[in-house]
């Protein structure tokens, strides 16, 4: 049996260094692991490290308000709830995202409307958004999928003159440039994830950003049991359910240190993936990610497509051949969440009288044909987020691809 090209395991990603350890010890020695209280007063906004972290994020993104949360799922629920939406309102969302992006809409008894993706960027397609707008549309959630910015400028043109907000789900792209601006800063609300495999890692956590004082106030209320704090202002409480979405002091201390390194972390990931592109670009039948000076990629994963005019071998077989050569972190498809049972079967979330029957056509999976086509036998990727790849690793990944491509093109 032939020896695989890569006969060792890639080193796992670990961005936690001495700076984060010192910061954690500082919190532990203080004995104050959380400074939050669900009541009016100074502690409603959290402890010393939370407030310091939020100020640092505001400075980093040149944004007016940052609201930390204990996960980006919490952040999405908080962002959607801040829009003063009502049950039955519609929010347009991409099928290519983590399920939390759409279930955050269900949380407020609103209806997620799936608009198809762009076949080149994998982000929500503005022309498909246009087809899905109705009188009940209140917002659009645009996801920077795999670390590539959604086309916010084009989305703004589609919704011009309409009272529709934009939430940017930048979980996978904390420092991607979108026409000269950091992605997330050019929407009504943006936000980032700090889950362990993201570019910023606090274990769990996230942060929401906005320039709107009103939205920031509502998000702080949702984050911290808002109904227990505001007693007389009915307007600010409109359809608010407060939660414990509060980030701890330890995570905040880690995040402060991580943000100091973010530009370098992104640069390192970009260098790795640009080397991959340089090494793979001459292989026939493989379509690689692109970026420009104005629109940059954070490469949460390294996405690729098969050109079916050139490659007839099944994606599964190609993946298996690459795995035999020792390539790690390969994924064969990406979950089209419009096909999940809760959407496909029109299952109501918490209400028997939820008006799914009014919007049945939304959940027809054929409405997202590009998403389905890519998932069927075209899209695949490397989860570069899991590893700390070096030059040797990259060289051997490229060599593995070359060996596999030689086999599949020879058989054609």
Image (tube, rainbow, N blue to C red):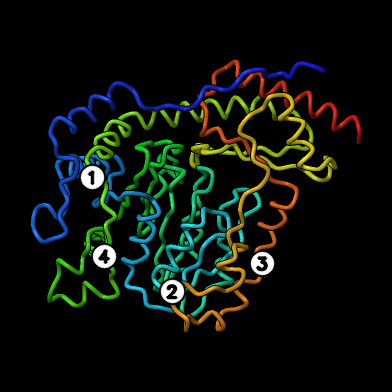
From the image, tell me which residue sits under label 2: 350
User: Which one is closest to the eye, mark 2 or mark 4?
Assistant: 2
Total marks shown come to 4
**Quadrant position of the C terminus in the picture:** top right
Spatial separation of the CA atoms under disc 1 and disc 3: 40 Å
- What mark, if any, has residue 54 been given in the picture? 1
Spatial separation of the CA atoms under disc 2 and disc 1: 34 Å
Image position of 194 (left or right of 252): right
User: Which one is closest to the eye, mark 2 or mark 1?
Assistant: 2
Q: Residue at x 85, y 28 (%)?
A: 407
Image position of 352 (left or right of 245): right
From the image, tell me which residue sits under label 3: 365
- What mark, if any, has residue 318 been given in the picture? none
Within 10 Å of disc 1 (Cα), the crowding (few <14, some 14-19, many 20+) is many
The earlier-in-sequence mark between 2 and 1 is 1
User: Which x, y percent locates residue 349?
Assistant: 46, 72
| Element assignment for label 3 | helix
From the image, tell me which residue sits under label 4: 242
Q: Residue at x 24, y 51 (%)?
A: 64
Within 10 Å of disc 3 (Cα), the crowding (few <14, some 14-19, many 20+) is some
Within 10 Å of disc 4 (Cα), the crowding (few <14, some 14-19, many 20+) is many
């Amino acid at each position: 049996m032939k020896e695989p090209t890569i006969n060792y395991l890639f080193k796992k990603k670990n961005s936690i260094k001495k700076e984060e350890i010192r910061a954690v010890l500082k919190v532990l020695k203080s004995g104050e692991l959380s400074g939050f209280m669900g009541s009016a007063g100074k502690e409603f906004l959290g402890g010393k490290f939370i407030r310091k972290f939020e100020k640092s994020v505001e400075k980093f993104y040149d944004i007016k308000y940052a609201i930390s949360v204990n996960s980006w799922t919490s952040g999405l629920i908080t962002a959607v709830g801040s829009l003063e939406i009502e049950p039955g309102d519609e929010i347009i969302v991409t099928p290519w995202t983590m399920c939390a992006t759409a279930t955050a809409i269900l949380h407020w008894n609103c209806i997620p409307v799936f608009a198809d993706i762009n076949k080149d960027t994998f982000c929500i397609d503005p022309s498909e958004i246009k087809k899905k707008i109705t009188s009940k549309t209140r917002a659009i959630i645009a996801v920077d999928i795999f670390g590539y910015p959604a086309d916010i400028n084009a989305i703004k043109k589609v919704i011009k003159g309409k009272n529709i907000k934009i939430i940017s789900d930048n979980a996978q792209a904390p420092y991607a440039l979108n026409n000269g601006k950091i992605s997330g800063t050019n929407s009504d609300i943006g936000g980032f994830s700090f889950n362990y495999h993201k570019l910023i890692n606090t274990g769990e956590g996230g942060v929401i950003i906005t320039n709107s004082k009103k939205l920031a106030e509502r998000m702080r209320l949702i984050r911290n049991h808002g109904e227990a704090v505001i007693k007389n202002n009915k307007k600010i409480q409109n359809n608010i359910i407060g939660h414990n979405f509060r980030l701890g002091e330890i995570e905040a201390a880690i995040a402060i240190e991580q943000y100091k390194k973010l530009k370098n972390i992104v640069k390192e990931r970009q260098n790795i993936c640009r080397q991959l592109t340089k090494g793979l670009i001459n292989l026939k039948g493989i379509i690689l990610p692109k970026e420009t000076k104005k629109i940059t990629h954070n490469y949460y994963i390294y996405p690729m497509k098969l050109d079916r005019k050139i490659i007839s071998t099944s994606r599964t077989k190609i993946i298996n051949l690459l795995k035999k050569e020792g390539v790690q972190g390969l994924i064969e498809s990406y979950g089209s969440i419009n096909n999940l049972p809760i959407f496909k079967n029109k299952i109501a979330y918490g209400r028997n009288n939820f008006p799914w029957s009014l919007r049945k056509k939304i959940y027809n999976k054929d409405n997202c044909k590009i998403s389905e086509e890519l998932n069927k036998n075209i899209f695949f990727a490397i989860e570069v987020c899991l590893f700390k790849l070096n030059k040797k690793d990259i060289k051997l990944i490229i060599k593995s691809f070359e060996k596999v491509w030689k086999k599949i093109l020879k058989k054609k």
